[in-house]
Amino acid sequence: MLLEAFQLGDLNLKNRVALAPMTRARAGVERLPNALMAEYYAQRASAGLIITEATVVSEQGIGWPNTPGIYSQAQSEAWRQVVDAVHAKGTPVFMQLWHCGRASHSSFHHGNLPVAPSAIKLEGDMIHTPNGKANYEIPRALETAEIPGIVEDYRRAARLAKSAGFDGIEIHSANGYLLDEFLQFKTNHREDLYGGSLENRLRLLTEILEAVLTVYPSRRVAVRLSPNGVFNDMGSPDYRETFLYAAEQLNAFGLGFLHIMDGLAFGFHGLGEPMTLADFRNVYKGPIMGNCGHTQASAEQLLQAGDCDLVAFGRPYITNPDLVERLSNGWPLTDFSDMKHWYSPGAEGYSDYPAYQA
């Protein structure tokens, strides 16, 4: 099933494989996509669907060096070369929209603290900043009056993505970034309309969805969640209740797909049993995409069981640009454990991995 065609709304996918969104940090200090990025994505366009690396919706959302943005007309125009290169291979491409929230540092923001739902510090490894490694800081809690501006940042980003030719967008509400921080009690201790109850903690995501749906039809919009993740110091005791509620509520939007980080390859918070795609299939009625550490065999098993409709592959795609062809022909995969050059500025460790030579 993995290598069979799939109808995703009005999009004809040549297989059920998606290129997972992965931060690769090749956009330079201007945060402008470039020809190297276009080459990288085109190399991997035998996937049924391409999802771009996380792309910041505003300067406030920045939290990684050299990641691309989608908050200016120049960025939108620069993304066009990437979209055109992928479309030339007959593959649709979605842009993932991102705000880093507390997973950032004041050195990205002219000395101003990063923002978050609550002033709760990210406990963990140091962050890479423009000035080298640094400790995470206690973020500034967003004022209620600031939140509509963030919603508008996402609407603007959606417009700019559409202007660049993207077939759709994915809202990044996972991995301990801003929208995940609002959703989870561990990072959201607010007492206004955006905190407390499950409904309130989901409010920012739903308001953003309502905003971007004025730009794209619902079948061209997706959401990403990470119910099991410990990345960026996440994991809340009520995770099961929280994420099943979120998925159930997202039914109302008729999304293109719900992207679930079900695998445990990035670590597990260990607060109970891991949530599975079957858990989400019980409450979510639209297409589901699984992700995180899956192999061809585990992907086939999930698809055969009916637990998901698509499977995203991340790290294997870094060193195997022709991943679909390798899976189709039983060719071996190039090892993807060496991360030395994954975030370096040039082609090395990025677009210089060769296709398999039979």
Image (spheres, rainbow, N blue to C red):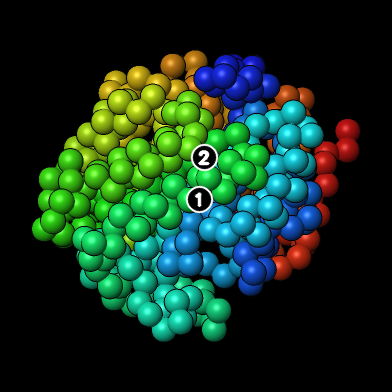
Q: Nearer the viewer, residue 152 or 115?
A: 152
Q: Residue at x 19, y 52 (%)?
A: 194
**Amino acid marked by disc 1:** Ala
Left or right relative to 198: residue 67: right
Give residue 169's mark. Answer: 2
Left or right relative to 50: residue 191: left
Few, some or many residues within 10 Å of mark 1 (<14, 14–19, 20+): many
**Amino acid marked by disc 2:** Ile
Q: Residue at x 32, y 25 (%)?
A: 251
Left or right relative to 189: residue 73: right
* Quadrant location of the N terminus in the rendered image: top right
Give residue 323's mark. Answer: none
Residue receiving disc 1: 157
Label 1 – label 2 distance at C-alpha: 10 Å
Foreground mark, 1 or 2, reads 1
Q: Nearer the viewer, residue 58 or 276?
A: 58
Determine whether the residue tagged by mark 2 lies in a helix, strand or loop. Answer: strand
Q: Nearer the viewer, residue 231 or 202?
A: 202
The percent coordinates of residue 348 (x first, y second) are: 77, 62
**Residue 45 in the image: above or below residue 135:** above
Residue extending farthest to the right is 358
Dots 1, 2 in contact, CB < 8 A: yes
The percent coordinates of residue 121 (x first, y second) are: 28, 71
Is there any visible trace of residue 327 in the rendered image? Answer: yes
Q: Residue at x 24, y 45 (%)?
A: 203
> Toward which corner of the image does residue 125 lie, by quadrant?
bottom left
Count of numbered marks: 2
Is there any visible trace of residue 343 in the rendered image? Answer: no
